[in-house]
Image: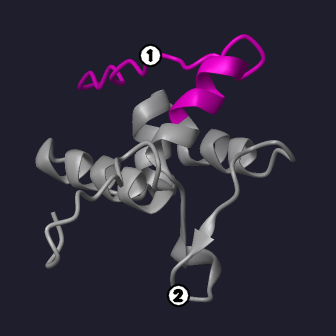
């Protein structure tokens, strides 16, 4: 209700800004960063930095938000990245399990 006692009819579904804020608040509550950098993208997919860089250069990869004006300031919406990876998993390079090197004394 507002000051005049009138019922406010704005719901999350009617206001995209409120919906997005609710999503970001939920992400913060579970400890997930609101925006991902390339490190988080690589960690999510389980790949190295080179593969992550190749992924973000694809023309249909989600658009980055540049928070600093420099390439290192690019960030992505986690949900968009997760959806994109889900749609392209078959065409992306397979992640490899890294095995520790066998360091035997000679």
Viewer-closest of 96 and 40: 40
Identified at 48% across, 39% down, the residue is 79
Q: Give the crowd class for mark 2: few <14, some 14-19, many >=20 residues within 10 Å.
A: few
The first of marks 1 and 2 along the sequence is: 2
Magenta-highlighted residues: 82-106
Identified at 58% across, 29% down, the residue is 83
The quadrant the C terminus occupies is: top left
Tag 2, which secondary structure? loop
Q: Position of residue 41 (x, y in %)?
A: 49, 44
- The residues bearing labels 1 and 2 have C-alpha atoms spaced at a distance of 34 Å
Viewer can see residue 17: yes
Viewer can see residue 93: no
When the figure is inspected, residue 98 is found, relative to residue 61, above or below; the finding is: above
Residue 68: image tag: 2
Q: Is residue 84 magenta?
A: yes
The residue tagged 1 is: 97
Q: Is residue 24 magenta?
A: no
């Amino acid at each position: 209700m507002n000051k005049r006692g009138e019922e406010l009819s704005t719901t999350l579904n009617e206001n995209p800004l409120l919906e997005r804020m609710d999503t970001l608040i939920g992400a913060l509550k579970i400890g997930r960063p609101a925006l991902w950098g390339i490190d988080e993208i690589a960690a999510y997919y389980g790949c190295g930095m080179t593969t992550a860089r190749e992924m973000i250069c694809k023309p249909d990869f989600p658009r980055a938000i540049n928070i600093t004006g420099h390439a290192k300031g690019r960030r992505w919406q986690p949900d968009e990245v997760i959806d994109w990876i889900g749609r392209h998993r078959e065409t992306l390079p397979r992640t490899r399990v890294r095995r520790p090197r066998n360091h035997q004394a000679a």
